[in-house]
């Protein structure tokens, strides 16, 4: 049986959400393409992770899936089209698109620089819109009714204004797709996973999140992967146009 192709963006770190999502979709039976952009990791607190994309690819292959690992600077206007070109060339047309990439540099209302604000919008909003657009324009006819778009969002905004503002705009782009891609019968949903410890939390913050969450812990990458797996499955196809808080009850 021919495996369908999923594209997961933002898979630069083995400990990140993108890696968990990509490997889970491979387990579910997809061939999985991933993107990463090493210069972003180099300026983040966790530093460069040059070997991580290859390790994620090895984990995907270990499930029996094919994969393609594509560097992509999503701040560039031409990156989404070039990315889909490469994935189609190596794996075939994409029928599942998972947006887990993000520019995220903390700054508030009074200290955000224009360049930073513009970069957040370019990566988190414009690139996501262009990826959804390219995905829809190339969508394979034999997958009509089985297409999925899932994006990861956040409601963090205080002290992180450009990130929070761009994530709010991302939500609206993806939720619009739930209606505007009705001719392809593609479902489009947004997942807010709440605080997920991928190595960035301090012990103090981890304890604070656990105390504030009814289930008594912070989220894990596998928690997020389980929900995304369901939304991308045949069983999850009826869920459409939703922003889902999957956070252990933190928002309750």
Image (cartoon, rainbow, N blue to C red):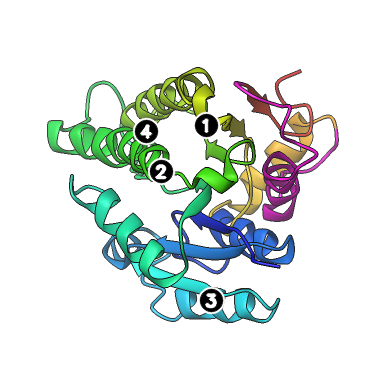
Q: Position of residue 17 (x, y in %)?
A: 58, 54
**Relative side of 78 to 94, left or right:** left
Answer whether residue 99 is visible to the viewer in this image: no
Q: Nearer the viewer, mark 3 or mark 1?
A: 1
Query: For residue 185, which quarter of the picture?
Result: top right
| Label 2 or label 4, whichever comes before in sequence order | 2
| Residue position marked by numbered label 1 in the rendering | 184
Q: Residue at x 46, y 56 (%)?
A: 93
Q: CA distance from mark 3 to mark 2?
A: 22 Å
Q: Which mark is residue 57?
A: 3
| Residue position marked by numbered label 2 in the rendering | 135
**Relative side of 217 to 167, left or right:** right
Q: Position of residue 127 (x, y in %)?
A: 30, 41
The stretch drawn in magenta includes residue 225: yes
Q: CA distance from mark 3 to mark 1?
A: 30 Å
Q: CA distance from mark 2 to mark 1?
A: 11 Å
């Amino acid at each position: 049986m021919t495996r369908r192709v999923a594209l997961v963006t933002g898979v630069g770190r083995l400990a990140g959400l993108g890696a968990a999502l990509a490997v889970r979709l491979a387990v579910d039976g997809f061939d999985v393409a991933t993107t990463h952009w090493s210069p972003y990791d180099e300026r983040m607190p966790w530093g460069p992770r040059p070997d991580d994309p290859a390790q994620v690819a090895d984990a995907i292959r270990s499930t029996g899936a094919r994969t393609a690992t594509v560097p992509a600077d999503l701040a560039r206007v031409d990156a989404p089209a070039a990315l889909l070109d490469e994935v189609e060339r190596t794996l075939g047309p994409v029928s599942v698109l998972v947006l887990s990439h993000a520019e995220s540099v903390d700054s508030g209302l009074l200290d955000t620089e224009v360049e930073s604000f513009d970069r957040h919008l370019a990566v988190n909003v414009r690139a996501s819109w262009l990826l959804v657009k390219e995905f829809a324009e190339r969508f394979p006819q034999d997958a009509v009714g089985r297409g999925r778009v899932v994006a990861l969002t956040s409601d963090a905004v205080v002290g992180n204004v450009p990130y929070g503002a761009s994530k709010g705009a991302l939500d609206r782009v993806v939720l619009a797709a739930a209606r505007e891609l009705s001719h392809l019968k593609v479902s489009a949903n947004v997942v807010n996973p709440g605080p997920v410890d991928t190595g960035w939390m301090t012990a103090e913050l981890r304890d604070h999140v656990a105390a504030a969450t009814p289930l008594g812990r912070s989220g894990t990458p596998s928690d997020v992967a389980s929900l995304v797996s369901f939304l991308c499955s045949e069983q999850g196809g009826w869920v459409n146009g939703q922003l889902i808080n999957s956070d252990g009850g933190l928002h309750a």
